Amino acid sequence: MGKGFLTHSTAVILQAVANGYLYGFDIIDITGLPGGTVYPALRRLEEAGHLASKWEKQSIAQVALRPPRKYYELTRAGREALAEAVKRYRLLEQTQPNKKRDPKPSRA
Amino acid sequence: MTLFARCKRIFSRPYLRLIAVVGVIVPRRLRADWRQEWEAELQCREALLADWDKLDGRHKLDLLRRSTSAFWDALWLQPQRLEDDMFQDIRYGIRMMRKAPGFTAIAVLALALGIGVNTAILSAVNGFVLRPLPIDKPAELIAPYWGRKTDTQVWGKFSYANYEDLREQNQSFSDLCAWTETSAGISSSESRNGGDSERAEVVWGDLVSGNYFDVMGVKPVLGRGFLPEEDLTPNAHPVVVLGHSFWQRRFDADAAIIGKTIYLNGQPFTVIGVMPESFLGSTFYLRKAFLAPLMMSQKFGRRAEWKTDRSYALFNLYGRLKPGLTMAQAETDLNLVADNLAQLYPKDNTDTKIQLTTELDGRYEGATKIIKYGGLLALCISGLVLLVACANVANLMLARATTRAKEIGIRLAIGAGRGRIIRQLLTESVLLALLGGGLGVALAYQVSGVIMATFPPVPYPASLDFAPDGYVLKWMLVVSLLTGVIFGLAPALLASRTDLVAVIKGAAGQSRSRRRWNLRGTLVVAQVTISIIVLICAGLFIRSLGKVRQADPGFQAESLVTMMINPSLLAYDEKETTKRFFPELLRRIEAQPGVRTAALVNEMPLAVGHLSSGPILKEGEIEPLPNQGVNSDYSFVTPKYFDTLRTPLVQGRDFTDHDDIDAPRVVIVNQEFARRFYGSADSALGKRFRMSQGTPLMQVIGIAKDGLYHSLYEDRRVYIFLPVYQHPRTGMTLMISAESAGALSAVVETARREIAQMDARLPVVGVMIGEENLSLEYWGPSVAAGMATTFGVLALVLAAMGLYGVMTYAVSQRTREIGIRMALGAQVGDVLRLIIRQGMRMVLVGIGLGLVGAFALTRVLASLLLGVGTTDPLTFAGVAILLVAIALLACWIPARQATKVDPMVALRHE
């Protein structure tokens, strides 16, 4: 992945994570991008070090009767890359509402 | 979450199944994480919406759509797969195989032979008993059979009236249909002198009830099936549905055939449909040319009272159970109906019962003992051959592991885990096995072709197919993989336990672990054991075939031509045919050049069908108690029958043309009959007896020499010959004895011409020339002998290869020792003895074990071996000597190499 250069959709995804949408499906919902785009992008971003992933706590998942979810966080490199991208895609910050950072699954 | 709850969730939700499936292509390193992420996301989504069962279709669809994007995700991860251990192993394995082409070729070839014969045998078994009928839900097709209560297994058919009652009164079948097989003469014209260039032929078909198509779950691809009204009135609706291959062959797949008229048994039938290509008929073994309503039974030679006579059991039944019912319940239900029928119609239904089996199980249960045991034995023997091949490859792998000890040691030394090494080696052996499997299946196609080609000419359109199908291929893939693991595991385990220090010091070749040696020796012993067992089987079968060929069938087949004709197919009257048509036919044929004599018989000796009657009552005798009398088989013959077969009459005279319906009843019996009933041929002549209670007395006018009637290995049996001119019949076999064996095919043409001149519509079938008349009898034993021999030779070659390999290896290991011995004064002979003794020790142990094994195993063969004891000493000794000779050779070559060791070189080697 080119340093500091993100495609628009990748930047949108990064922005979504920054806005507090930490799970693949939440990102799909908020960005409106297809899952076949979002997931590979997440993996590329993770590989490039822009994102880091963590598994949800077992106790939370157990209550919901499902395996723990994987959630993504911006790394420092990710934040820098996003800042770069925002300069280029000026409308990026306004495309999606901010969300309170909350590792629990929302019932929205 | 409990495991159960988890399983339940996964199986109730299609999206989770999809994830599980797609996950297979995700690199293994990432797979668990990947699956978990997707499952968690999807389940979380579901939890947000509602429980799955309460979701509406739109949301369900949305979840599914979301889960499909997992596939793209997985696809994107594909490049990382190349870094998978497995791919690495495979790439490395292929490199190693290409580095040692000789080893690879031998291993693959050995496996291909082993897997190939197994595929061929499994295919044949598959063709007989495993391949389902090409109909809807074939495994659920139930076949009821009818018979006496005293019999443990009944195979009887049903009368039409009983079928109708069963169908109406049973509570357990959703429907029952009836069918029966029939042959018919087909011609394209109605008139006797036809003007018809095509030869009339006999075809086989099924007469079926109107609900047949529904019960079977098949539909014509062209036209329609039978209408309900075509299933009501006898002889009212001459319609016919053609079989696909018959339609293609005879009518060039002409779609315009629908509505046209064809002539079956000389009667016009309207073609209303064509069956699908896959559908061959009601049974797995006969290819049917047509289906006709069973209401037309009379047109196919059935008696007029077929519909009402409860003793006229003509029909097979097929049915399907109502949902939720078991076979046992249905059987109880049908037997209630049967008991009811027994009360209403005691004459024909007393003491009868009904048994159910599925069509597929029925094939196996109904198969003759020879086919059952033969198939099982073939599977066992081919399995043994595969084991020998496995042992062989395992030995090769062991030897190779020794040469690769350095490589493996280094890998271990720089940190490879033992599991990793084992996996690498197993990957290589599985690769070999798959290559061998692929080649083996290709070989199997050839072999099944050969098996088909040896099939004797039978006058029936057999639909047996011995080519491997998807089912067989799937199994062979499993077998190949298993083989790879079986022969790869032990060498891999041993190789990964390399002595690191020795390897690093460069002394790997010398460090000989005793265990490895023992394993190699054990493998050789096992190979020799198995191959001697297989060879003894082969030997016994060959001896048995020899006995069969020497057996005197009681007639001379060399200059004999036979063919079947049945004028009643063309609605000829029985009496008229017997009185005029047959004598005229024989007169015409005997007048032809090259023909010595000609005669007719209803069934050739050693043919499939037999008539039997009894108990025989001598004049003045009263009927014996049940099960006490003696029955006798009989056939109907014309004058000159004995002359044509060159079976001499030992006493009395032959039938003449004057022994007809108006003349006193006469009979010819065989010597055994005369002996059994009258003490001798002399005293039998002129005596009178009845075939059974209530039949007219018949006078013995001649005594025929004993012959073989049912099979070539039967004991002497009593036999009666009746003059056909006194007992009118029409379905006959025409036998012509040619003046010389060279003129046989000319005689066939002459006979065909003469028959066509009498009636061009009359089909001639089952033409057998010379020795072919016995081919059906020879077929079983010769296939058994051929197959067992092939297997035996294969096992022998494989075992010899294995022994040779092991000895070569042993010699290379002992080079230094041999060098020292020679330096100390050992002679060439000493060295030869040393090596050969080492090899022969294993061989002798193997032979000993093999002889014991064969002694035990061949008891099972007793029923398949004809005229040879299962402990035939000649076979046992012969095979043992053969094996010793081959083994000596396999040891001698490496031993000679050993004698060429130069002591100086061997010693300097250190």
Image: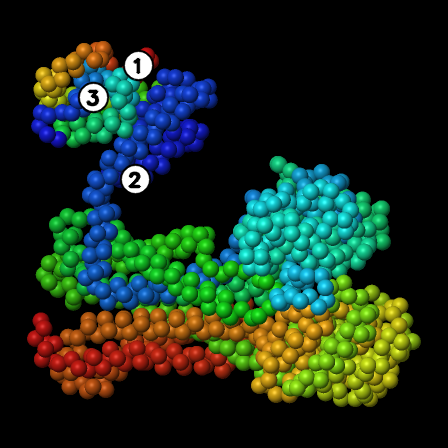
- Name above or below for residue B690 compared with residue B506: below
Check the picture and name the quadrant holding the C terminus of chain B: bottom left
- Evaluate whether residue B493 shows in this view: no
Mark 1 and mark 3 lie on one chain; the one further toward the N terminus is 3
Q: Nearer the viewer, mark 3 or mark 2?
A: 3
Q: Nearer the viewer, mark 2 or mark 1?
A: 2
Disc 3 crowd rating (10 Å Cα; few below 14, some 14-19, many 20+) is: many
**B888 relative position to A74: left or right:** right
Disc 1 crowd rating (10 Å Cα; few below 14, some 14-19, many 20+) is: few
* Residue B857 at x, y percent in the picture: 50, 68
- Name the subunit of mark 1: A
Relative to the observer, which residue lies in front, B749 or B3? Answer: B749
* Residue B895 at x, y percent in the picture: 24, 80
- On the image, numbered disc 1 is attached to which residue? A106
Residue that appears at 44% across and 20% down: B55
- On the image, numbered disc 2 is attached to which residue? B25
- Name the subunit of mark 2: B
Q: Are marks 1 and 3 on the same chain?
A: yes
| Amino acid type at image mark 1 | Ser
